[in-house]
Amino acid sequence: MSKGYIICVDDEVSVLETLAEQLNARFGDSHVIETASSAEEALSLIEEIVSNNDIVELIVSDQVMPGMKGDRFLEQVHQKLPDAIKILLTGQAGLDSAIYAINNGGLSRYVEKPWNIEELSKDIRYLLDKFHQNLENQHLIQALNRRILELEEKSS
């Protein structure tokens, strides 16, 4: 099975590099960690990954970025990838943006900067386990539906 993708989005290079290094150290064996310095760049990256039939499992996005803000970016991602895990990082406690992202972007977690990597990693591991359980359930439901159709065809 191919590795899933984790995408980190932040306009501050040092924050982006630190986050990617930390996640790569903890999840690099099972995931490809990609970075983008803007929401627009991240959307292009997601399109490329999806067009290669790979799976974007997790997106960690900063809220305050030039151009598109994190909550609006996650809203667009949610329209294309409703099952992907979405985490919003922010250095500015903005409850309105978190509420917007929860209601419109399928937000899984809201994390304030500076983050605690141990807590963030624990949350991510839990969310990835849940993601994989949901994916497995979808596959089982599809297999069950195919089997039901086969049995219906045989009985008619």
Image: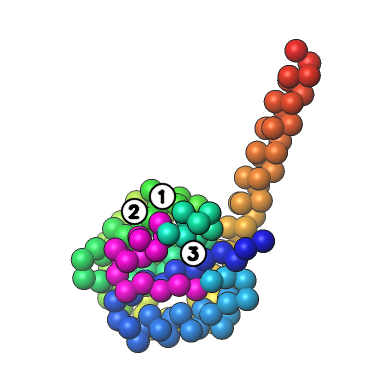
Query: Label 3 belongs to which residue?
Result: 58
Q: Residues within 10 Å of mark 3 (few under 14, many from 20)?
A: many
Q: Residue furthest left?
A: 67
Q: Quadrant of the C terminus?
A: top right
Question: Which is nearer the eye, 72 or 53?
Answer: 53
Q: Secondary structure at mark 1?
A: helix
Query: Label 2 belongs to which residue?
Result: 76
Q: Is residue 99 above or below residue 151?
A: below
Q: Residues within 10 Å of mark 1 (few under 14, many from 20)?
A: few
Query: Label 1 belongs to which residue?
Result: 80
Mark-to-mark CA distance, 2 and 3: 14 Å
Which disc is residue 99 wearing? none
Q: Secondary structure at mark 3?
A: strand
Q: Is residue 115 above or below residue 64?
A: below
Q: Quadrant of the N terminus?
A: bottom right
The magenta stretch is 33-47
Q: Residue at x 42, y 59 (%)?
A: 48
Mark-to-mark CA distance, 3 and 1: 13 Å
Question: Which is nearer the eye, 94 or 2?
Answer: 2
Q: Is residue 24 above or below residue 56?
A: below
**Which amino acid does the dot numbered 2 rest on?**
Gln
Q: Is residue 84 something one can see in this rendering?
A: no
User: Residue 38 placed where, x, y %?
Assistant: 29, 70
**145 with respect to 67 (left or right):** right
User: Which image quadrant for residue 29?
Assistant: bottom right
Mark-to-mark CA distance, 2 and 1: 7 Å
Is residue 90 on the magenta stretch? no
Circle 2/circle 1 CB separation < 8 Å? yes
